[in-house]
Amino acid sequence: MREKCHKSCGVTPDCTPKESPKPWPGRATADGTRLFSTMYPGAYHAAEHHWRRDPAMGEFYLPGQQMRGAPWLHLSSLGVGTYLGERDARTDEQVTTAIIASVHRGWNCIDTASNYRNSRAERSVGAALNALFSGNVGITRDMLLISTKAGYIADDIADNLMIKGSKNGGIVTDYIVGGNCIHPNCLDASLKRSLSALNLAMVDILYLHNAAESHLGGLGNEAFLKRLREAFAWLEGARKEGKIAAYGMATWDCFRKAPERGGLQLQDIVKLAESVGGRNHGFRYVQLPINARMREAWEQEWQAVEVDGQTQKKTFMEAAARLGVGVFASAPLLEGELLKDEALRVKLDEVEELALLHNLGVKLLQISRSTPFLTTALIGHKAAKNADANVRLIALDPLNRDTFHKVMAQIDDGGKQAIV
């Protein structure tokens, strides 16, 4: 817990908890997120289309599928990511402060992972949540969507569980690949640690972290889907126990590859979830990179989807919307690499529709959040000036669909895109 309020987040009055709180109960709700979007002072003046109706409630509403809210969660088009940064107390405080400031000014999505900054990221998020929920700033648990990830396991968890040939609950070492394991025992241990670090009784989304990227190549499709089924069965159990509200896959390239290059079909994953959890399964979200250079999600029609009894080829974003899967964009700045691209900078400076934005990072963030069918673009910011510039973007609407495609065509290199 933070010992004192550093007053660097701009939130007043004092948001420091008076005592160490118990785990915060609850989850994001339709009423809570709608109240945040319409009444909370920091969010009240956001542009209309900064708010998204959660497509994971069923944008096309499949037969027999129940809505998980009344009617939809209201989620901000921008959310706080917590991936990069040093593993030190100074960065801990910067992350905590940035989260508090971002929520206070109209962002209600927070994303982290069990392995980010060697587990320090989750503790930084937990400190921010303690300050927000137990301070005097008017934020309640039901206003925020909080996600974390399991898959990359800590050494002590591996040491305790990865006991070859064990008959007392251990699992064979074949399940761990490059530090990644999605065996139910590992997921369970990871979630317990995450809930403790976050000081929450439940997370809104638990992602399997780079599961396909870690396991698919070595196992092959059939064996990987069998392993994924075991993980989904455990995740459905965690839903019933009230530890998670929903689950998903946080990915890097498995949904950005063509099928012949090993890319996954989202409809296959949804059907797998249905076979485990029924029509109202909990597989509702996917994270993948979407930015000015990584365009596959909205550009390539690689996803086969059944529409009115016919199989049609769709982009990943179109397929996700039709299948009721919400999409969160990661790496809008490609971990800072796009900020070094001088040719891209010049092109973006010539785009009239981005002329009001004077910061390259904010221009790139505007592009990512404007992706058709996207729920939220996630950005990690720690420095106060960067956080302030990013947060101010909520005053502007994202680009509409036609304008988005016009801008992306304008900055495209001859219509060519690198194929994963």
Image: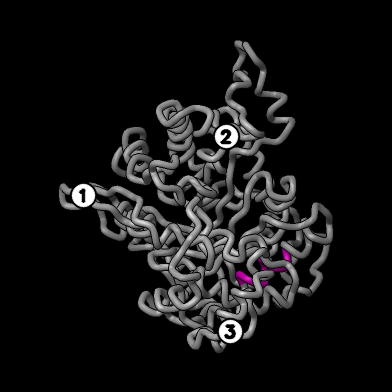
- Which image quarter holds the N terminus? bottom right
Relative horizontal placement of residue 332, taking residue 48 as reference (left or right):
right
Which three-letter amino acid code belongs to the residue tagged 3? Answer: Asp
As measured in the structure, the alpha-carbon distance from the residue carrying label 3 to the one carrying label 1 is: 46 Å
Q: Quadrant of residue 213?
A: top right
Q: Which residue is mark 1?
A: 63
Asked if marks 1 and 2 touch (Cβ < 8 Å), the reply is: no
Q: Residue at the location (62% across, 28% down)?
A: 176
Towards the viewer: 5 or 120: 120
Q: Is residue 228 visible?
A: yes
Q: Which residues are magenta?
A: 96-103
Crowding at mark 1 (Cα within 10 Å: few <14, some 14-19, many 20+)? few
* Residue 32, horizontal then vertical, whole percent: 47, 65
Compared with residue 111, is residue 377 higher up or lower down, i.e. above or below?
Answer: below
As measured in the structure, the alpha-carbon distance from the residue carrying label 3 to the one carrying label 2 is: 45 Å
Q: Which residue is mark 2?
A: 187
Crowding at mark 2 (Cα within 10 Å: few <14, some 14-19, many 20+)? many
Relative horizontal placement of residue 194, taking residue 395 as reference (left or right):
right
- Magenta span: predominant SS is helix
Q: Secondary structure at mark 1?
A: loop
